[in-house]
Amino acid sequence: MSPFKLFLLCYIISTAFIYAIRIKGKFEIILPGDIYIEKQGLHIYFPISSSLLLTILLYIIFKTLF
């Protein structure tokens, strides 16, 4: 698997993981690069820096294991 495909796969996994934890209400940490908009009952959350940080960690773990 090419490094780009592995990095993209890690990014998709980490973003899905963060959204799943966020929906359950157990993830209240918002990093400075994340976009969080809350207006009149509308909540929009884009975990840009959170998923990027988790992606880098997953990428390093996968590259050392495989």
Image: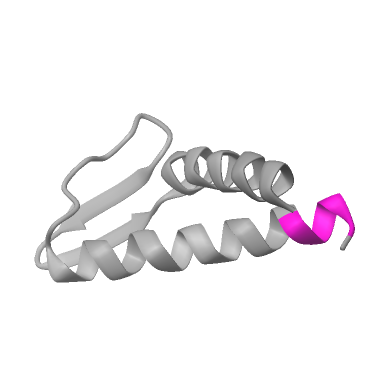
4 within the magenta span? yes
Picture quarter with the N terminus: bottom right
x and y percentages locating residue 42 in the rendered image: 18, 67
Q: Quadrant of residue 63?
A: top right
User: Going by the image, does 11 lie left or right of 42?
Assistant: right
The magenta span reads 2-6
Give the residue at the far front of this rendering: 65
43 within the magenta span? no
x and y percentages locating residue 8 in the rendered image: 71, 59
Foreground: 32 or 26? 26
The residue located at (30%, 61%) in the rendering is 44
x and y percentages locating residue 22 in the rendered image: 23, 62
Give the residue at the far right of this rendering: 2
Q: Is residue 58 above or below residue 9?
A: above
User: Going by the image, does 17 lie left or right of 27?
Assistant: right
Q: Is residue 12 above or below residue 65?
A: below
User: Going by the image, does 64 lie left or right of 10?
Assistant: right
The residue located at (80%, 61%) in the rendering is 5
Foreground: 25 or 56? 56
